[in-house]
């Protein structure tokens, strides 16, 4: 309970309808001005902000610009005739933004993106891919343990603790397991690629590719990455794809890793040539298990800072006690991702007791606060562009239908951003209270000044001295 209960105030905020018109938006750097009702405290008290409630619907995608991008590069292959030939490549590839129901689909899409890159740089020949470790030396199947049809939800079991769990598909159909290994689901995946030359024959010169795949995680303030002549964006070079896809985090940039010896290349995944077949196969294996939830945002963070304006700054400089007992933090609350009974996802915090999340204000005068919502690395939440289209529209456009026949061109030009005119916003409540603190006043503790009386200077507690002036 606050020491000055009569000065405690509960404040409710809803950032809908472009709450942050003065330089921000509905989730990033929106401002709250107390106008004619600021909060003030003396040196004997301190102001405290305490979170009591927060809610934001997940209207953004799990897979977005902060976690969907990898760097892929390869060497040129020079040959003649129908032999496999390729141009050198070094670029970023990105998984399509959206929500993925499980890791199987995520891994399958990643394999397809790698295959598409290889077929772009290959000028003579082609590449195919399947989600498995490939055939054995004798040509038999490994069971294709990595395909996304291997596992499904057992809808026939409605009792705890198996309700809704993921189980092998053969149990669903009532079949018998052939090997114990088929009962094991691992979150590491293999992608089995096959190289063919221009005549459809096995291509045996994969080693000339020197394929490199990197999950870059290099802060822009540390180094600016450039591929060729194109500078990388902040999200491209500082990306969480390693956490999403189970790769090794690459924190140091290599200008041309394909030209380096194999032992010196920094790889996020294992890339190994399969020598058991016809030498035109290679396997890419994830280093670590992929993220179970197919997302990298289990929490969002509400950040708060005091605005630096003439009113607050002048008073703070003149009146604050300047003690360093309190270390301020801009993170006001850590809000978890929650799933309700209807399987809808939101970021919700209910803190009615007012204990876990609070921050102390180091100024004696508070009239203007700035809030922002970020991920765990301080990046803003990625809004969904109006150019993002449903899967059915993407398929129609890829089949040759003009985009103008699917989406009105005027709408694309006039539509605003999701975090200014759309449904990416939040509502929350916090309490501003005043609390007493022990403050030792800055009093000069020295002997009192001398007192002159009848031409004598007397000191407290000291026998008077006879001084003749």
Image (cartoon, helix red, strand yellow):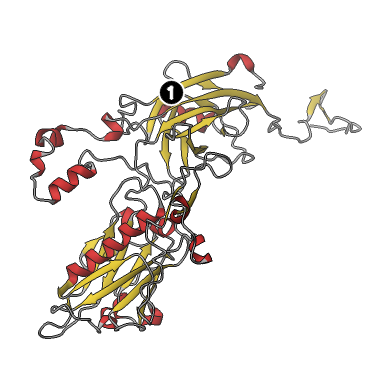
Residue 35 visible (yes or no): yes
Residue 41 visible (yes or no): no
Q: Nearer the viewer, residue 339 or 23?
A: 339
Position of the C terminus by quadrant: top right
For numbered disc 1, what is the local secondary structure?
strand
Q: Position of residue 184 (x, y in %)?
A: 51, 61
Q: Is residue 273 left or right of residue 406?
A: right
Position of the N terminus by quadrant: top right
Q: Position of residue 396 (x, y in %)?
A: 14, 46
Label 1: few (<14), some or many (≥20) within 10 Å? few
Q: Position of residue 240 (x, y in %)?
A: 40, 55
Residue at x 39%, y 46% (from the top left corner): 379
Seen in the picture, residue 114 relative to 397 is either above or below; the reply is below
Q: Residue furthest right?
A: 463
Q: Is residue 23 left or right of residue 317?
A: left
Q: Nearer the viewer, residue 468 or 84?
A: 84
Residue at x 20%, y 75% (from the top left corner): 88
Q: Nearer the viewer, residue 359 or 39?
A: 359
Q: What residue does disc 1 label?
A: 13
């Amino acid at each position: 309970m606050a020491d000055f209960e009569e000065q405690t105030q509960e404040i409710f905020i809803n950032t809908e309808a472009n709450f942050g018109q003065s330089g921000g938006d509905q989730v990033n750097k929106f401002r709250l001005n107390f106008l004619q009702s600021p909060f003030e405290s003396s040196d004997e008290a301190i102001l405290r902000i305490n979170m009591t409630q927060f809610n934001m619907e997940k209207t953004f995608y799990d897979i977005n610009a902060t976690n969907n991008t990898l760097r892929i590069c390869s060497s040129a292959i020079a040959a003649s005739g129908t032999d496999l030939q390729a141009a050198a490549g070094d670029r970023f590839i990105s998984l399509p933004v959206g929500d993925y129901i499980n890791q199987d689909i995520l891994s399958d899409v990643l394999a397809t993106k790698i295959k598409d890159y290889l077929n772009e740089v290959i000028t003579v020949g082609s590449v195919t891919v399947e989600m498995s470790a490939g055939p054995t030396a004798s040509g038999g199947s490994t069971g294709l343990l990595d395909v996304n049809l291997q596992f499904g939800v057992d809808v026939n079991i409605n009792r705890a603790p198996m309700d809704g769990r993921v189980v092998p598909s053969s149990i669903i159909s009532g079949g018998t397991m052939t090997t114990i290994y088929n009962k094991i689901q691992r979150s590491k995946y293999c992608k089995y690629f096959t190289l063919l030359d221009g005549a459809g024959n096995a291509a045996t010169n994969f080693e000339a590719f020197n394929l490199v795949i990197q999950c870059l995680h290099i802060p822009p303030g540390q180094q600016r990455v450039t591929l060729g002549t194109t500078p990388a964006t902040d999200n491209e070079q500082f990306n969480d794809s390693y956490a999403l896809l189970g790769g090794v985090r690459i924190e140091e940039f290599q200008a041309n890793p394909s030209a380096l010896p194999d032992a010196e290349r920094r790889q996020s995944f294992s890339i190994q040539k399969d020598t058991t077949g016809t030498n035109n196969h290679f396997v890419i294996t994830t280093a670590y298990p992929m993220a179970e939830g197919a997302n990298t945002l289990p929490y969002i963070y509400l950040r708060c800072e005091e605005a630096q304006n003439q009113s607050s700054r002048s008073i703070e400089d003149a009146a604050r006690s300047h003690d360093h007992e309190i270390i301020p933090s801009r993170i006001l609350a850590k809000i978890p991702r929650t799933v309700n009974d209807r399987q809808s996802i939101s970021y919700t915090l209910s803190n009615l007791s007012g204990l876990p999340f609070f921050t102390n204000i180091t100024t004696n005068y508070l009239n203007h606060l700035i809030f922002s919502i970020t991920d765990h690395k301080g990046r803003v939440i990625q809004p969904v562009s109006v150019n993002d289209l449903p899967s059915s529209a993407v398929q129609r456009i890829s089949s040759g239908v003009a985009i103008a026949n699917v989406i009105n061109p005027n709408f694309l030009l006039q539509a605003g951003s999701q975090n200014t005119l759309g449904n990416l916003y939040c509502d929350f409540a916090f309490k501003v209270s005043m609390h007493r603190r022990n403050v030792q006043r800055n009093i000069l503790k020295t002997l009192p000044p001398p007192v002159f009386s009848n031409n004598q200077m007397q000191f407290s507690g000291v026998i008077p001295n006879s001084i003749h002036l």
